Image (spheres, rainbow, N blue to C red):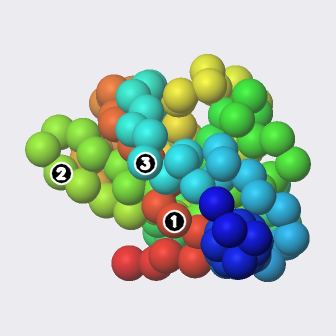
């Protein structure tokens, strides 16, 4: 292989590495990129909305969701939309709170989000859900 061909190949490799997109926070986190594609299934309950763990006031008429404290971490999912499916219906709710009593794949819904699927008297149902890409909104 000639020195010129070797130099061109090396230069092409350097350009390929430099072309990788770096998120605004300056770190590459593969779990963030893949998380939105993972569909979870768990128990869905409802709660009285108020001041959520994201630091924002919410009402029962807002389409919001609280995620498990086991998934919460540092609150990186605050204001991230979630697609929820159950009972042949789909809804989108905004992640705004942390659920201290929830299993890792369980979700706690505002009254409006819960009643999209069932009356609150049902109390609990099984839902499939997934995070949407950060920045996405319905």
Q: Residue at x 43, y 48 (%)?
A: 37
Q: Residue at x 86, y 70 (%)?
A: 26
Q: Secondary structure at mark 2?
A: strand
Q: Residues within 10 Å of mark 1 (few under 14, many from 20)?
A: some
Task: Give the camera-side residue of 23 and 116.
Answer: 23
Task: Give the camera-side residue of 15 and 29.
Answer: 15
Quadrant hosting residue 42: top left
Q: Which residue is mark 3?
A: 37
Chain-order first, disc 3 or disc 1? 3
**Disc 2 to disc 3, C-alpha distance:** 19 Å
Q: Which mark is residue 133?
A: 1
Chain-order first, disc 2 or disc 1? 2
Residue 59 drawn at (x, y percent): 60, 68
Q: Secondary structure at mark 3?
A: loop
Residue 127 drawn at (x, y percent): 34, 34
Relative to residue 137, is residue 31 depicted above or below?
A: above
Q: Residues within 10 Å of mark 2 (few under 14, many from 20)?
A: few
Between disc 2 and disc 3, the foreground one is 3
Left or right of 123 in this view: 16: right
Taking the view exactly as shown, the residue that stands out farthest to the left is 88
Residue 106 drawn at (x, y percent): 53, 29
Between disc 2 and disc 1, the foreground one is 1
Quadrant hosting residue 73: top right
Q: Which residue is mark 2?
A: 89
């Amino acid at each position: 292989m000639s020195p010129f061909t070797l130099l061109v190949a090396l230069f092409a490799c350097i350009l390929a590495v430099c072309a990788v997109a770096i998120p605004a926070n300056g770190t590459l986190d593969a779990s963030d990129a893949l998380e939105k594609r993972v569909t979870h299934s768990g128990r869905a309950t409802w709660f009285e909305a108020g001041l959520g763990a994201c630091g924002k006031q919410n009402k029962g008429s807002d389409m919001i969701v609280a995620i498990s404290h086991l998934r919460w971490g540092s609150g990186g999912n605050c204001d991230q939309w979630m697609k929820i499916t159950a009972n042949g219906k789909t809804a989108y709710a905004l992640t705004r709170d942390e659920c201290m009593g929830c299993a890792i794949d369980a979700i706690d819904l505002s009254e409006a989000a819960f009643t999209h699927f069932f009356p609150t008297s049902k109390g609990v149902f099984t839902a499939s859900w997934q995070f949407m890409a950060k920045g996405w909104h319905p």
